[in-house]
Amino acid sequence: MGEASPADAATEPPATPEPPPAPKKRKAPRAIATTSAVKPDAVTPVIEADAPTEAKAKKKGKRTIDGATLADAFAGYLRSLEDAGKSPGTCFSYRLELVMAGVELGTDTKIANLTPERVLLCFTSDRVMKTRGGRPKSPLSIDKTRRVVRQALTWAERAGMVAKAPVPEMVATH
């Protein structure tokens, strides 16, 4: 009685395996970031400068580009982000941070004349530390501004615009 007869086995449908889960679908294909993807608005000034291409030898030390300004460094850094395929949102966000730093430090300032102390003053200025309404900014926002400026100055060093990036020694605010 406990045994199944061959007739019972034939009437039961065979077990079907479950299909694999469907792959997740994107809403749209990823777009490649281009220089025209980020449109500057009327309020935010555009950082326009050509990154210097020649490195001139000094008497001692590394080869650097004479006369390289912060505008040159910031524009070159933003162009390197676009070339690396960073999203338009990232490029736009970083541009806003660099415009704020450019207003504070002066975009016509030569990188060779910029000192870590001057950059530190920028990092601790009200423009970086407070909102336009005068309230303290989030530590994450402050750190982002500092990180973007530090990355741009370090990029300028790697690009040969300055022998040593004028980056102050700091710790995170959070």
Image (cartoon, rainbow, N blue to C red):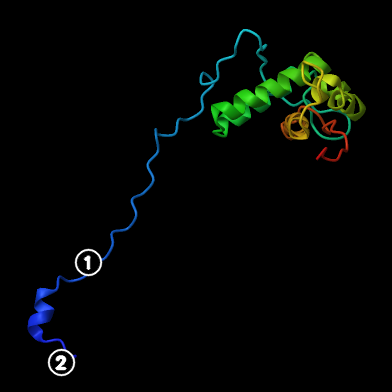
Most foreground residue, 16 or 109: 16
Horizontal side of 127 relative to 121 (left or right) equals left
Asked whether the viewer can see residue 52, the reply is: no
Q: Residues within 10 Å of mark 2 (few under 14, many from 20)?
A: few
Q: Position of residue 168 (x, y in %)?
A: 87, 34
Q: Position of residue 52 (x, y in %)?
A: 70, 21
Asked whether the viewer can see residue 16, the reply is: yes
- Distance from disc 2 to disc 1, alpha carbons, whole Å, reads 28 Å
Q: Quadrant of the C terminus?
A: top right
Residue at the spot 82% in from the left edge and 40% down from the top edge: 172
Q: Residue furthest front?
A: 1
Q: Residues within 10 Å of mark 1 (few under 14, many from 20)?
A: few
Residue 124 found in image quarter: top right
Residue at disc 2, secondary structure:
loop
Q: Which amino acid type is marked by label 1?
A: Thr
Horizontal side of 73 relative to 6 (left or right) equals right
Residue at the spot 78% in from the left edge and 34% down from the top edge: 139
Q: Which amino acid type is marked by label 2?
A: Met
Residue at the spot 34% in from the left edge and 54% down from the top edge: 21
Residue 60 lies, with reference to residue 72, above or below; the image says below
In primary-sequence order, the first of circles 2 and 1 is 2
* Disc number for residue 54: none
Horizontal side of 54 relative to 90 (left or right) equals right
Most foreground residue, 100 or 33: 100
Q: Which residue is mark 1?
A: 16
Q: Which residue is mark 2?
A: 1
Residue at disc 1, secondary structure:
loop
Residue 48 found in image quarter: top right
Residue 90 found in image quarter: top right
Count of numbered badges drawn on the protein: 2
Most foreground residue, 25 or 55: 25
